[in-house]
Image: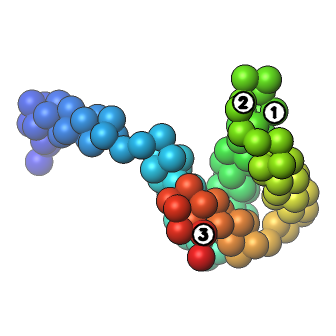
Amino acid sequence: MTENPMNQMLGSRGYGATQRTRSLREQEAGVFRCLNYALKAALNSDVIDRARVVADNQRLWLAIESAILHPANQLPNALKASIVGLSRSVQREMDKEVPDLPFLTGINDQMIGGLSGDPG
């Protein structure tokens, strides 16, 4: 049974409205949550699925590093240095032939906590 196009449109509008009410930090934490879900699922997947999710994680961390290093970024220098260092550690792990997925999800969990205001 196909869904009514009107219901799809209204559902899409509702989702968009919900997204607009979330803070940028909450949205960023949501990206990490989705990626962590995929990383955890990849633990029991084949090599191709693991490679795909690691590539997605790599794109996220490259984007983070790029944003942190952008001249307009106004975060304190010490925080920038910490995040860039973390990003490079994650990149080194992802460059391994068999990346440690629990390590990657742990780092992402730390970012979720920091973005959500719950670093513990």
Q: Residue at x 82, y 66 (%)?
A: 99
Q: Secondary structure at mark 2?
A: loop
Res. 73 mark: 2
Q: Residue at x 67, y 44 (%)?
A: 60
The answer to whether residue 83 is above or below residue 117 is: above
The residue carrying pointer 1 sits among few (fewer than 14), some (14 to 19) or many (20 or more) residues within 10 Å by Cα, namely some
Nearer the observer, 102 or 77? 77
Residue at screen point 59% across, 76% down: 120
* Nearer the camera: disc 1 or disc 2: 2
Contact? badges 1 and 2 (CB < 8 Å): yes
| Disc 1: which residue | 69
Q: Residues within 10 Å of mark 3 (few under 14, many from 20)?
A: few
Out of 2 and 15, give the one closest to the viewer: 15
Q: Are marks 3 and 1 in contact (CB under 8 Å)?
A: no
**Looking at the picture, which amino acid does disc 2 mark?**
Asn
Residue 101 showing in the rendered view: no
